[in-house]
Amino acid sequence: MRTIVLVVIVVLAVIFAILNRNALLFPHTLSLGFVTYREVPLGLILLLTGLVLALIFYFWAGVSRLRAQADSARLLRDMEALRNSLDHQEGSRFAQLQGYLDQRFQALGSGGAADQGETVGQQLAATNARLDALERNLNVQLAQIDDYLKRRLR
């Protein structure tokens, strides 16, 4: 879009210069304070100065856009690192849960539950309910992370 606007401005300036070439090339006396130039086409100098300024601002806007894209890419890298860290933490939670389940199953197999007054079926149902709750919680958290990343990538 910026390129199209710049091309339109340049084309309009060229058309203006062609239509008014006599006025643009009319000789003037130009004084810079310490030196005076005679027979200088002041209109042409002003037109070229305007075009140079348009080019400078065009490239300045391009550099600003590149900086914004670099900041966005840095933010996405940081978010990916955060996601990997969260995945690692979830993995360690799963390892803890696996250890807990192994311990509970060993206790169930050795009859340790009968000493506590609970039946094996009740403990197994409670463990299954806890596993289901943890799985739902993990799925919700992963869906939230995925939605957040998708929103940021748009």
Image (tube, helix red, strand yellow):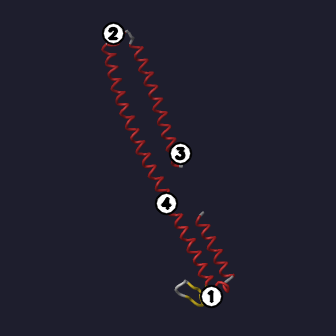
Foreground pick, 139 / 22? 22
Foreground pick, 31 / 64? 31
Residue that label 1 marks = 28
Question: Under tag 4, what secondary structure?
Answer: helix
Query: What amino acid does circle 2 point to?
Result: Asp
First-in-chain label (1 vs 4): 1
- Evaluate if marks 2 and 4 touch, with contact meaning CB atoms under 8 Å apart: no
Task: Find residue 67 and report its horizontal and vertical position in percent.
Answer: 48, 59
The alpha-carbon separation of the residues under discs 1 and 4 comes to: 43 Å
- Evaluate if marks 1 and 3 touch, with contact meaning CB atoms under 8 Å apart: no
Give the quadrant of the N terminus. Answer: bottom right
Residue that label 4 marks = 66
- Rendered image quadrant of residue 32: bottom right
Task: Find residue 131 and report its horizontal and vertical position in percent.
Answer: 43, 25
- Rendered image quadrant of residue 14: bottom right
The alpha-carbon separation of the residues under discs 2 and 3 comes to: 53 Å
Question: Under tag 1, what secondary structure?
Answer: strand
Q: Residues within 10 Å of mark 2 (few under 14, many from 20)?
A: few
The alpha-carbon separation of the residues under discs 3 and 4 comes to: 20 Å
- Evaluate if marks 2 and 1 touch, with contact meaning CB atoms under 8 Å apart: no
Residue that label 2 marks = 115
Question: Under tag 2, what secondary structure?
Answer: helix
Residue that label 3 marks = 151
Query: What amino acid does circle 3 point to?
Result: Arg
The alpha-carbon separation of the residues under discs 2 and 1 comes to: 110 Å
Task: Find residue 117 and report its horizontal and vertical position in percent.
Answer: 37, 9
Query: What amino acid does circle 4 point to?
Result: Leu
The alpha-carbon separation of the residues under discs 2 and 4 comes to: 69 Å
Q: How many marks?
A: 4
First-in-chain label (2 vs 4): 4
The residue that appears at 45% across and 50% down in the rendered structure is 75
Query: What amino acid does circle 1 point to?
Result: His
